[in-house]
Image (cartoon, helix red, strand yellow):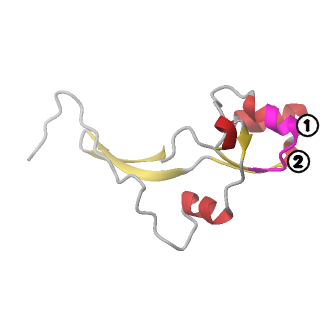
C-alpha cells in the first residue's frame, strides 16, 4: 500500500499496472476455535507489473522496508519475472503448487491438548 500511496503523491500511478502481495487463506486453530486468516506465503516479496522508469525504480527502492530487487547485480537491477512464474506464485496457474505452506495449528502455553 505504501508504494501505491507514494506513486499517487508523485504522479506515477499510471506507470504501475499491478501490485500484488502473494497471500493465501489459512485455517488456524487457536484455543479450540477455527479461524481463517490471510497469510503471506512469500513474506517480504511484492510482485509489481510496471513500466520501469528511473522515477518508478527510485520510488520502489526508497520505500521503507524495501531492501532490493530480484535480479542480477546484487538486487540492484531488477529483472522481469516470466508471466508463467507469476501465475504459479499467485496460484492462478493450471498446475498445482506443492510448496505452499499447509494449514497450521497454534498452541498457547496452558492450553489443554488432547492426544
- Magenta region includes residue 51: yes
Residue receiving disc 1: 11
The residues tagged by marks 2 and 1 sit, at their Cα atoms, a distance apart of: 8 Å
Foreground pick, 87 / 112 = 87
Q: In the figure, 82 relative to 45: above or below?
A: below
Q: Are there few (<14), some (14-19), or many (20+) residues within 10 Å of tag 2? A: few
Task: Tell which of 87 and 20 is nearer to you.
Answer: 87
Which residues fall within the magenta stretch? Answer: 49-58
Q: Is residue 54 left or right of residue 37?
A: right
Q: x, y (%) of residue 21? A: 60, 46
Q: Quadrant of residue 110?
A: top left
Relative horizontal placement of residue 33, taking residue 47 as reference (left or right): left
Q: Is residue 43 above or below residue 23?
A: above
Mark 2 lies on a secondary structure that is helix
Q: Nearer the viewer, residue 1 or 52?
A: 52
Which label was assigned to residue 14?
Answer: 2
In the image, residue 112 above or below residue 47: above
Can you give x and y, in whole percent of width and height, for residue 14 in the image? 88, 47
Whether the residues at callouts 2 and 1 have beta carbons within 8 Å, the answer is yes
The residue at 67%/39% (across/down) is 69
Amino acid at each position: 500500500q505504501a508504494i501505491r500511496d507514494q506513486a499517487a503523491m508523485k504522479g506515477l500511478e499510471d506507470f504501475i499496472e499491478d501490485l500484488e502481495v502473494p497471500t493465501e487463506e489459512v485455517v488456524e486453530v487457536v484455543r479450540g476455535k477455527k479461524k481463517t486468516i490471510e497469510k503471506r506465503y512469500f513474506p517480504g516479496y511484492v510482485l509489481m507489473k510496471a513500466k520501469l522508469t528511473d522515477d518508478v525504480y527510485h520510488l520502489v527502492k526508497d520505500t521503507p522496508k524495501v531492501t532490493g530487487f530480484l535480479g542480477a547485480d546484487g538486487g540492484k537491477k531488477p529483472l522481469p519475472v516470466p508471466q508463467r512464474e507469476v501465475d504459479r506464485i499467485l496460484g492462478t496457474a493450471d498446475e498445482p503448487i506443492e510448496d505452499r505452506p499447509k494449514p497450521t495449528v497454534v498452541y498457547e502455553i496452558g492450553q489443554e491438548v488432547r492426544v
